[in-house]
């Protein structure tokens, strides 16, 4: 069921190049272990190449050479593992809170020979930014995770200043931008930009909303702590 359909072969060659065999091995993992372990629905197995692999690989055109990529809510590795396969110049961290999913991701990374380029972080996006060595990336990706306002609040703190969030979205992406643009600005994001990736290669093109982290905005918890500290200093004076 994970066999590459002949009509998609040219698109797959363009997007994966010399790593097409690695992409095929990943497709097989998704169609077998991914389905058995509940990461991919049984009805998705015949559509793994067009709906998942090619759809995700098209996003690579927006990722700078040599970038550090963080994939939030990675699930079965979409799009993070796909980008790591298509772009061996990238360093990718897959961020996923559920144990059964991180177990699959760790096994997939080893099976595909991606140990040197990909690591798995078990936890939520907020946990990845905490601690003495917070995780940071040039690019943060997310696919089918949450509406744009919540997604920006979770993902932008993971991006370095002037880094970007690439959110893979569906047909309602333009409406989401209008609805959540103000919320995106409040968490430090610039104006969301809509992209259609893979035009002329994949059909339909992949819809991506790009948001640049223009400002560093403190979290509500940090802001409250700062206000409490200022209040305490004022009382001492």
Image (tube, helix red, strand yellow):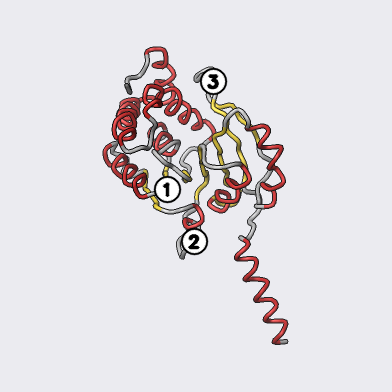
Q: Secondary structure at mark 1?
A: strand
Say if 26 sits above or below 68 in the image: above
Residue 122 located left or right of residue 166: left
Q: Quadrant of residue 43?
A: top left
| Label 3: element kind | loop
Look at mark 1 in the image and give the residue it sits on: 96
Residue at the spot 39% in from the left edge and 52% down from the top edge? 122
Can you say which quadrant of the picture contains the N terminus? top left
- Spatial CA distance of label 2 from label 1 is 15 Å
Question: Where in the figure is residue 224, as x and y percent of width and height?
Answer: 64, 68
* Farthest-out residue, bottom: 236
Contact between marks 3 and 1 (CB within 8 A): the answer is: no
- Residue 206 appears at what percent x and percent y? 54, 27
Q: Which residue is mark 2?
A: 130
Callout 1 crowding tier (Cα within 10 Å): few <14, some 14–19, many ≥20: many
Whole-percent x, y for residue 149 in the image: 63, 45
Disc 3 to disc 1, C-alpha distance: 28 Å
The mark that comes first in sequence, 2 or 1, is 1
Q: Secondary structure at mark 2?
A: loop
Identify the mark at residue 204; answer none if there is no mark: 3
- Closer-to-camera residue (221/66): 221
- Which tag, 2 or 3, sits closer to the chain's start? 2
């Amino acid at each position: 069921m994970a066999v590459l359909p002949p009509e998609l072969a040219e698109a797959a060659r363009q997007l994966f190049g010399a790593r097409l065999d690695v992409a095929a091995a990943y497709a097989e993992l998704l169609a077998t272990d991914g389905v058995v372990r509940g990461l991919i629905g049984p009805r998705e197995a015949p559509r793994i190449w067009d709906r998942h692999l090619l759809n995700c690989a098209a996003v690579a055109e927006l990722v700078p050479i040599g970038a550090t990529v963080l994939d939030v809510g990675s699930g079965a590795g979409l799009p993070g593992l796909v980008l790591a396969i298509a772009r061996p110049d990238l360093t990718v961290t897959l961020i996923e809170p559920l144990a059964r999913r991180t177990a699959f991701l760790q096994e997939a990374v080893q099976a595909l020979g991606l140990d040197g380029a990909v690591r798995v972080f078990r936890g939520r996006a907020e946990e990845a930014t905490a601690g003495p060595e917070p995780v940071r990336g040039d690019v943060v990706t997310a696919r089918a995770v949450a509406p744009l306002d919540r997604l920006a609040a979770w993902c932008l703190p993971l991006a370095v200043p002037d880094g970007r969030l690439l959110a893979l979205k569906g047909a309602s992406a333009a409406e989401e931008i209008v609805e959540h643009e103000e919320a995106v600005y409040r968490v430090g994001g610039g104006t969301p930009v809509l992209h259609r990736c893979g035009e002329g290669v994949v059909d339909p093109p992949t819809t991506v909303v790009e948001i640049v982290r223009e400002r560093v905005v403190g979290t509500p918890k940090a802001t409250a702590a700062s206000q409490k500290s200022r209040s305490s200093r004022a009382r001492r004076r």
